[in-house]
Amino acid sequence: MGVLWVDNDVFNYLCKAGCLEAVLSNAPYTLRTTELVRNEAAAGGIALQSAITAMDRGEISVHPLGKPPLHQALQRIGGLSPTDLSLLLCAQHLGGQVLTNDKRLRIQCVAEGVGCKLFLEFLDECDQNGWLDAQTIEKLRVLCGAV
Amino acid sequence: MRETVKLPSLAEVVSKRVRSLRERRGWSLSELARRAGIGVSTLSEIEAGQSAPRLDTLVALAHALGAPLDTFLYANENPLEARLRAIETPENLPALQLWLERCRRYLEIEALVGKQGIRAPVYALQPSRRRRDELLQIEAIAEQERYRLQLGIEPIADLVTVVEEAGLRVIGADLPEHDVEGAVLFVAEHEAAVAFINCAKPSLRQRFTLAHEYGHLLLHRNRAEIWERDLFRANTPEERQANAFAAAFLMPKPLIERMYDEYGFSRKRKQLPMYGWLVMTRRLQVSPHALAWRLYNLGYIHESERDWALGEGASLLKEMERAFYDEPLEPPKVPTLSERARALVLHAYCQEQMTISAVIATLERTLYAVQEYLTAATMDTHKATKFFERVNTLLHGGEQHGSAVGG
């Protein structure tokens, strides 16, 4: 079904709800992220350990800094971090959509013509297709303030 | 991203900045390689721009050089960097790099939320040959400024908030203690003025420095940037004027007169009793040093009394303070990021102008610690209470409170 470039906001929800492995096993998307996201996650301590482990095992592929399109220096965009910019660039040049719950990031994706899937839309898909159980989906909706 | 400009390669940017920072720290290739835990040949290749380093190598280099990672990722150098070279030393370079990044982020948030601009007026000093006339002019400016800011004559409790509301941005710098007191930068492209305060100095000193930088903003904004290595030994007219402003602003003459009357101190004797020094420094929240110069310039004490306070008096007064008071006088230190800046970050986030990743970088927090609070930030209190109850139940079986959410 395509590639999702995942930000840390989403990894954090999935780790807190303890369902990252279920998403990796059941959702027919290829989850990718960037080395800058991984670095930010690592700075968060043990909380995001399952995401780091999945990245290290290759279950979530990590696009390295220095490889196109991240071979160029970044251009500043107000309100965005280098981590956000790396996801945008990868989705734009390598294909796929950015998966985020961040409204500012979504606004920038739309402005740049980059595909973006909001986390709540993804949860609806998970619900409709049975990729996650109802209890987990409820948990994730609570965590992101949707209920 | 819209590729309207040709961006340099990451290898090129990293090469240039790593070499520049290494040389400014006075390190050889092997010294930096040793500190970063990488091979000399790897570092040599990076500096030659032959290849972009791996991220873990770049993180190690950034750490060793004491520079934020962002320094190596963006195409354009922070434009303020060149202006800080005047006070840069190999020892303070990491603190200056961090300060620059904080400053850049603060000004960027202001631009995002449209809160730029300096509201404080510029006061023109009339040229005067006599020092006394200059002091009188500055005295009047300080009084006018207190009136404009509706401060009355009472001591200023929260100086950072006062000067920030007047348009001076305040950012603390973690410099070595022996380093510069502070500085002010006028950033024309952002229509901003930023005060740079050394957080390692005693808090009374930080307070005086901040008032001094505010003086520069009011008196010398139309000139180029002003730097000072040591306020109290500065002998340029600008530094002298900024010191005079700080003294008059923090220690208004009417308040000093009122205290003299209240405690029955004699102006004629040109001396203060020991307890007078103690009472006045604590009430005005200034050091004996600053008070001594102020009273001397007002003609309330003799030169010998001033010199006593500048010399042996300071330590005697410290001992006396310990004997009579539970706590030493300690006004709040200048924060690395002010209340106002933090408020603007939250505002920008809630207005969908900043991403979570940019918020956590600016606040120097981890996502895991603040995610729920950012989610709740736009909720009304009723909804937020329910939200935290639900999150606690989900994550901790309902046994913990909101403060525990987010680890």
Image: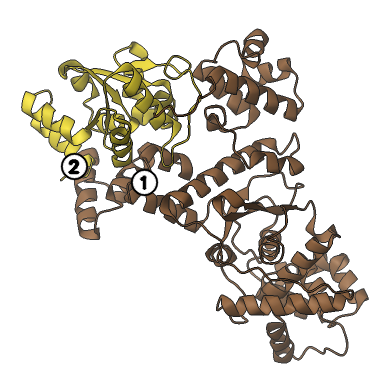
Q: Residue shown at 68%/17% (left/top)? A: B34
Residue at mark 2 to residue at mark 1: CA–CA distance:
24 Å
Q: Residue shown at 67%/79% (left/top)? A: B143
Give the colour chain A carries in the figure. Answer: yellow
* Tag 1: amino acid: Gln
Q: Is residue A32 left or right of residue B75?
A: left
Q: Quadrant of the C terminus of chain B?
A: top left
Q: Is residue B362 visible?
A: yes
Q: Which residue is identified by label 1?
A: B353
**B342 w.r.t. B47: above or below:** below
Please tell me which residue lies in front, B77 or B337. B77
Q: Residue shown at 51%/19% (left/top)? A: B56
Are the residues flagged by discs 2 and 1 from a single subunit?
A: no
- Residue B192: where, in percent of width, then height? 57, 55
Q: Which mark is residue B246?
A: none
Name the chain letter of the residue that bears numbered label 1. Answer: B
Give the colour chain B carries in the figure. Answer: brown
**B395 w.r.t. A7: above or below:** below
**B126 w.r.t. B382: above or below:** below
Please tell me which residue lies in front, B10 or A18. B10
* Tag 2: amino acid: Val
Q: Is residue B231 left or right of residue B334?
A: right
